[in-house]
Amino acid sequence: MRQVIFYALLIAAWQTIYYLGVSVFNLWKPYAFPTPVGVWNSLISLIEQNGLFNAVFYSLERGFIGYFIAVVIGFIIGICLIKFKFLTHTAKPLILGIQTLPSICWVPFAILWFGLNERAIIFVVVMGSLFSIAISVDMAIRSVNPLYVKAAKTMGAKEYDLYIRVILPASLPSLVSGLKQGWSFAWRSLMAGEIMVAAIGLGQALTMGRDLADINRVALIIIIIIILGALIEKLVFTTIEDRVLKRMGMV
């Protein structure tokens, strides 16, 4: 109930700011500031044109594909950073540096290597989240209590069993948090790729709103992007995180 009241007040404040800025103080033109009513009308229009659901579907599809690839490669890199000390001292600082690179920087590479197509967008998603996941895997495994490893070795656990039965289960809470962070990077990277590459999706819808000077449509797509990102994080990653913590007796 509190959330409903909060968002109702937020919408009311938004409409009030628009009214004061446009009708009372003339601070900006009506077409330069979105309104709740205008955003709602844009939502209805996109639904009637069958454009919204297609855009959401294709964006989610690209996001999940790119994220899955990033998770697989990120896990491999993270394990290699743990396994080979040489990489820890040489490659890890480079990976940390690349992780800070804005995802939009990968767009020129994507276009030059793959052209204006789906693969270019997925490449941007992968590169935008890959290194964050690799560092998260590395940090999660390193955070495992050394006593667990020593106890398993004392009982004769081989290296494979050590990772599968001891290290990975003990690092699950940190791993899930890292994967959740990786998803946020992937989602932001997806929008950067779709804005630059012409393809059906939320990024293209955002670009069309800009080209048409439709500020309400731009605001609508931004709100949808925020809601989808938050929903996936809440329904998928937070749910998994809670179950892992409960299973390990940490909550």
Image (cartoon, grey):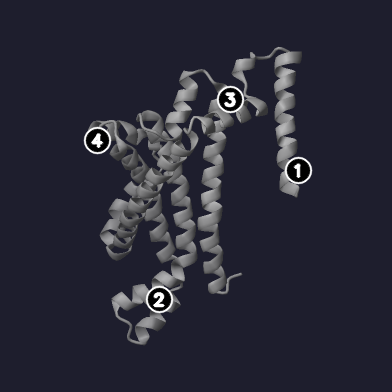
Q: Marks 2 and 1, Cα distance to the nearest angstrom?
A: 46 Å
Kindly check if marks 3 and 4 are in contact, taking CB atoms under 8 A apart as contact. Answer: no
- Find disc 4 in the rendering and name its residue: 114
Instruction: Say if 207 sits above or below 92 in the image.
Output: above
Question: Disc 1 marks which amino acid?
Answer: Ile
Can residue 144 be spotted in the picture? no
Element class at badge 1 = helix
Q: Marks 2 and 3, Cα distance to the nearest angstrom?
A: 52 Å
- Image x and y of residue 42, in percent: 57, 27
Q: Marks 2 and 4, Cα distance to the nearest angstrom?
A: 41 Å
- Residue in front for this viewpoint, 14 or 154: 14
Residue neighbourhood size for the residue with mark 3, other residues' Cα within 10 Å, grouped as few (<14), some (14–19), many (≥20): many
Kindly identify which numbered label has been placed on residue 166.
Answer: 2
Kindly identify which numbered label has been placed on residue 5.
Answer: 1
Which one is closest to the eye, mark 2 or mark 1? 1
Question: Which comes before the other along the chain, label 2 or label 3?
Answer: 2
Element class at badge 2 = helix
Q: Quadrant of residue 151?
A: bottom left
Element class at badge 4 = helix
Q: Quadrant of residue 14?
A: top right
Element class at badge 3 = helix
Question: Disc 3 marks which amino acid?
Answer: Asn
- Image x and y of residue 202, in percent: 46, 35
Question: Disc 2 marks which amino acid?
Answer: Val
Kindly check if marks 2 and 1 are in contact, taking CB atoms under 8 A apart as contact. Answer: no
Question: Disc 4 marks which amino acid?
Answer: Phe
